[in-house]
């Protein structure tokens, strides 16, 4: 009986966790993320499932029972299949397209340039990762964090460096959730108070015909340029034409509610579970997390600086804060830009203009991912 009791105790999670402090460390990280998501409301739709996944994924267990996310034929392994194949990111893009109104972008086409400019953070980080001796495919996967788009980061990493999905996904989603912490200091540093107080003209009204044509024209222009972006942009524009056509409201409603919510739950939870301490906590993972912060900061700075450069040639100046919304973190960065403008001048409403940059950033990051994938394969 004594031997049976000892055998039982040595197979419990309490015993395994006492043998490796890394599991305790990762559980504490998960609890911190839960606190930020619930108490501080930092992008809770993303952070809460990821954080709980971190906690669940770091409960140690006896290997061989088919429990862990990295064990063949386990339930979690099958759920993780949607991450490693890029299935969940594509479904998220479908829902995102069904939720996005591109009217503000169509009304102000010049703001598309800010979404493109923010992608410079991706390519600067690519060079930095290569300089730190990451393999080219790993460097490309790390660089896409600069797009501030979790699904795109996961999709590209699944294709180029699947062994890095955990750290790259956590870095991408963490920085998306921490936009209120990361972006405001960069915005203040690179703009003057006078620039932050610039008012934007009301965007013109966009016709239904324009909104209908855009997803068709968008998928042709973007995917002919970067065919490898088809799984993301094809789904994004499909969702958008479901919304704008007005004849399949049931499908559009399902795409922007039940479908995207389900995919977000599984994507976030599986990403969190992939941080299993004995796989996740490596020197390379920590370096990726640091590079991710650099990538996101460079992307924000690139958008801001390009907006200031544009103002050198524009008769009607644009508020350079909009450059910070050129990253793909919808709608977090647009909201932060609007709040910064309101802080300087309560009558300054930048939200719709920032959403134009934000939505172009979504398209830009998917194209950047497609370009990197085509070059690295």
Image: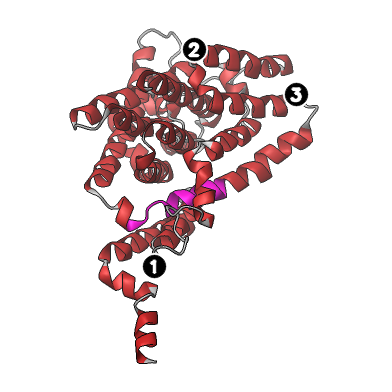
Task: Give the residue at mark 3.
Answer: 245
Q: Quadrant of the C terminus?
A: top left
CB under 8 Å between callouts 1 and 3? no
- For residue 211, above or below residue 281: above
Q: Observer-nearest residue: 339 or 11?
A: 11
Residue 341: which numbered mark, if any?
Answer: none
The residue drawn where x is 47% and y is 40% is: 84
Q: Observer-nearest residue: 356 or 177?
A: 177
- Specify the quadrant of the image occupied by residue 198: top left
Q: Residues within 10 Å of mark 1 (few under 14, many from 20)?
A: few
Q: Residues within 10 Å of mark 3 (few under 14, many from 20)?
A: some
Whole-number angstrom distance, CA of label 1 to CA of label 3:
53 Å
Q: Is residue 245 magenta?
A: no
User: How far from the left and from the top, in percent, is residue 328?
Assistant: 46, 31
Residue 62: which numbered mark, if any?
Answer: 1
User: How far from the left and from the top, in percent, is residue 116?
Assistant: 42, 19
Which label sits in the foreground, 1 or 2? Answer: 1
Q: Is residue 269 magenta?
A: yes
The residue drawn where x is 34% and y is 26% is: 122
Residue sitting at the far bottom: 1
Which label sits in the foreground, 1 or 3? Answer: 1
| Part of the protein shown in magenta | 264-277
Q: Decide whether the magenta segment is chiefly helix, strand or loop.
A: helix
Mark 1 or 2, nearer chain start:
1
Q: Secondary structure at mark 3?
A: helix
Whole-number angstrom distance, CA of label 1 to CA of label 2:
49 Å
Task: Give the residue at mark 2.
Answer: 225
């Amino acid at each position: 009986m004594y031997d049976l009791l000892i055998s039982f105790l040595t197979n419990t999670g309490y015993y395994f966790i006492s043998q490796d402090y890394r599991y305790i460390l990762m559980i504490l990280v998960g609890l911190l993320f839960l606190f930020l998501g619930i108490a501080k409301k930092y992008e809770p739709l993303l952070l809460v499932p990821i954080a709980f996944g971190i906690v669940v994924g770091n409960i140690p267990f006896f290997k061989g029972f088919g429990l862990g996310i990295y064990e063949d034929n386990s339930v979690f392994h099958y759920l993780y299949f949607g991450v490693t194949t890029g299935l969940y990111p594509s479904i998220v893009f479908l829902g995102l397209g069904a939720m996005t109104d591109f009217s503000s972008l169509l009304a102000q086409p010049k703001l598309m340039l800010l979404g493109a400019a923010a992608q410079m953070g991706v390519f600067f980080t690519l060079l930095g990762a290569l300089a730190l001796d990451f393999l080219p495919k790993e460097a490309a996967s790390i660089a896409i964090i600069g797009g501030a788009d979790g699904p795109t980061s996961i999709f590209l990493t699944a294709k180029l460096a699947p062994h890095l999905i955990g750290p790259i996904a956590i870095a991408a989603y963490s920085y998306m959730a921490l936009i209120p912490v990361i972006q405001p200091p960069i915005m203040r540093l690179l703009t003057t108070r006078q620039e932050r107080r610039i008012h934007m003209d009301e965007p013109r009204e966009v016709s239904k015909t324009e909104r209908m044509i855009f997803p068709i024209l968008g998928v042709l222009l973007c995917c002919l340029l970067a065919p490898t972006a088809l799984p993301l942009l094809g789904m994004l524009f499909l969702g958008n034409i479901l919304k704008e056509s007005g004849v399949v409201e049931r499908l559009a409603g399902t795409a922007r509610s039940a479908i995207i919510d389900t995919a977000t739950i599984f994507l976030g939870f599986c990403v969190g579970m992939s941080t299993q301490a004995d796989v996740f906590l490596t020197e390379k993972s920590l370096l990726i997390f640091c590079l991710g912060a650099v990538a996101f900061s460079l992307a924000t700075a690139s958008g801001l600086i390009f907006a200031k450069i544009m103002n050198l040639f524009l008769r009607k100046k644009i508020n350079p804060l909009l450059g910070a919304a050129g990253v793909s973190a919808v709608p977090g960065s647009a909201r932060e830009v609007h709040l910064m403008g309101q802080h300087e001048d309560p009558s300054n409403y930048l939200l719709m203009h920032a959403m134009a940059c934000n939505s172009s950033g979504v398209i830009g990051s998917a194209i950047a991912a497609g370009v990197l994938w085509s070059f690295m394969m």
